[in-house]
Image (cartoon, grey):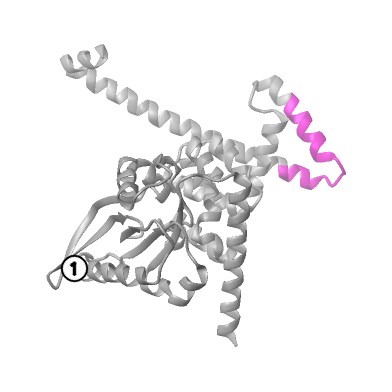
């Protein structure tokens, strides 16, 4: 409090203090970037040395000896465990262009969290999304725990598509719709009662808007609640209207307490057509609709061909189930979606 008073009374002090704070931020970022690059280079050097000696057990012995010597000379931070992480870091992200992006956005603590993922697709996904969204280490850990990759629409696509979409986001800041969409959405932060209305769900989302946007991504901007549109002298109300900067699209969210019904399609299609005609600005892509419901039938959704209308149906969870149950359901969902995709591709070829 006294510092703020001093700055108000002495403008020169305020200006110099701002310079010092800004410089500290730059110095901290430069140190972090240098550390991440150093650890990558160490991992690369260890890997090259291990590959050049094809003796059984050479790698483990060498890393342990190196860890002992480096710890004695430079102190903490160079244990066997950390050196092994550095080796894995280089093996996981051997491309220096990707390293440049990661080192400028992520700390070593972020990298350590990401390296816990055994699947290279997941590592690439979390590294790219974390750099794009600016997650803290805690937020990254939370996204991983909620199985964000498995809940993302992109996880149901072929590996090449996933890599290409992540590359486009890294290099061109171009986000695909599949990277944005999730199913299910985890809304456990809303603290709802066991029984609630659509209005209560909507109100809870607005109260916890910051957490809600974190689930959807940092490029998500809130525009309106219960947006009224008039067609042929009749009023209609959209539940929630957002704008996604990287997608450059308006996003309508409709909330349903029960199971998805085919008639929900026509309502959302009407909203999308109206937005496309009267609200879409030059340079923007066509609006998309997201219908959140408690249950859905994938076969019904597939028959309705909702994707052609720019509509995505997803379920939401107001309580996070046991991890193993969630993992089992999501893995089954990804497997079934890829099977349908393969069958569709085979049918088109024939």
Residue at left offset 77%, top offset 47%: 51
What is the quadrant of residue 62 in the picture?
A: top right
Q: Quadrant of the C terminus?
A: bottom right
What is the quadrant of residue 160 in the picture?
A: bottom right
Decide: is 56 above or below 287: above
Q: What secondary structure is the stretch in magenta mostly built from?
A: helix
Residue at left offset 40%, top offset 75%: 308
Instruction: Evaluate whether residue 3 shows in this view.
Output: yes
Does the magenta run of residues contain 59? yes
Instruction: Evaluate whether residue 163 shows in this view.
Output: no
Residue at left offset 51%, top offset 36%: 107
Q: Mark 1 points at which residue?
A: 278
Is 197 left or right of 55, judged from the image as shown?
Answer: left
Label 1 packing within 10 angstroms: few (<14), some (14-19), many (20+): few
Q: Quadrant of the N terminus?
A: top left
Residue extending furthest toward the right: 56
Position of residue 167 measured from the top left corner of the image (x, y, whole percent)? 50, 58
Position of residue 273 measured from the top left corner of the image (x, y, whole percent)? 26, 71
Decide: is 335 above or below 61: below
Residue at left offset 69%, top offset 34%: 83
Position of residue 174 measured from the top left corner of the image (x, y, whole percent)? 40, 59
Magenta range is 47-68
What is the quadrant of residue 262 in the picture?
A: bottom left
Q: What element carries label 1?
A: helix
């Amino acid at each position: 409090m006294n510092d703020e008073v001093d700055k108000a009374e002495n403008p020169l002090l305020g200006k110099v203090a701002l310079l010092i704070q800004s410089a500290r931020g730059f110095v901290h970022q430069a140190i972090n970037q240098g550390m991440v690059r150093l650890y990558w280079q160490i991992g690369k050097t260890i890997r090259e040395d291990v590959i050049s000696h094809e003796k059984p057990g050479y790698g483990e012995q060498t890393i342990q000896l190196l860890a002992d010597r480096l710890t004695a000379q430079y102190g903490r931070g160079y244990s066997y465990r950390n050196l092994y992480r550095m080796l894995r870091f280089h093996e996981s992200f051997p491309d220096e262009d990707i390293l440049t992006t990661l080192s400028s956005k992520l700390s070593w603590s972020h990298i350590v969290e990401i390296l816990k993922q055994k699947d290279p697709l997941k590592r690439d996904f979390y590294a790219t999304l974390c750099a794009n969204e600016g997650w803290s280490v805690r937020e990254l850990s939370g996204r991983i725990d909620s199985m964000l990759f498995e809940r993302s629409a992109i996880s149901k696509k072929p590996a090449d598509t996933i890599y290409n979409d992540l590359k486009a986001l890294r290099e061109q800041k171009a986000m695909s719709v599949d990277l944005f969409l999730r199913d299910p959405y985890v809304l456990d932060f809303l603290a709802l009662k066991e029984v609630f209305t659509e209005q209560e769900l909507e109100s809870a989302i607005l109260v916890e808007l910051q957490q809600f946007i974190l689930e959807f991504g940092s490029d998500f901007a809130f525009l309106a609640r219960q947006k009224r549109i008039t067609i042929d002298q009749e009023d209609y109300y959209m539940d929630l209207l957002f704008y996604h900067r990287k997608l450059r699209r308006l996003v309508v969210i409709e909330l349903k307490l029960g199971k998805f019904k085919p008639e929900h399609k026509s309502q959302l299609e009407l909203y999308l057509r109206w937005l496309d005609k009267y609200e879409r600005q030059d340079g923007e892509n066509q609006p998309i609709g997201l219908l959140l419901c408690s249950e859905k039938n994938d076969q019904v959704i597939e028959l309705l061909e909702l994707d052609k209308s720019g509509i995505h149906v997803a379920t939401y969870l107001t309580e996070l189930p046991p991890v193993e149950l969630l993992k089992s359901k999501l893995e089954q969902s990804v497997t079934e979606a890829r099977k349908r995709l393969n069958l569709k591709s085979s049918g088109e070829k024939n």
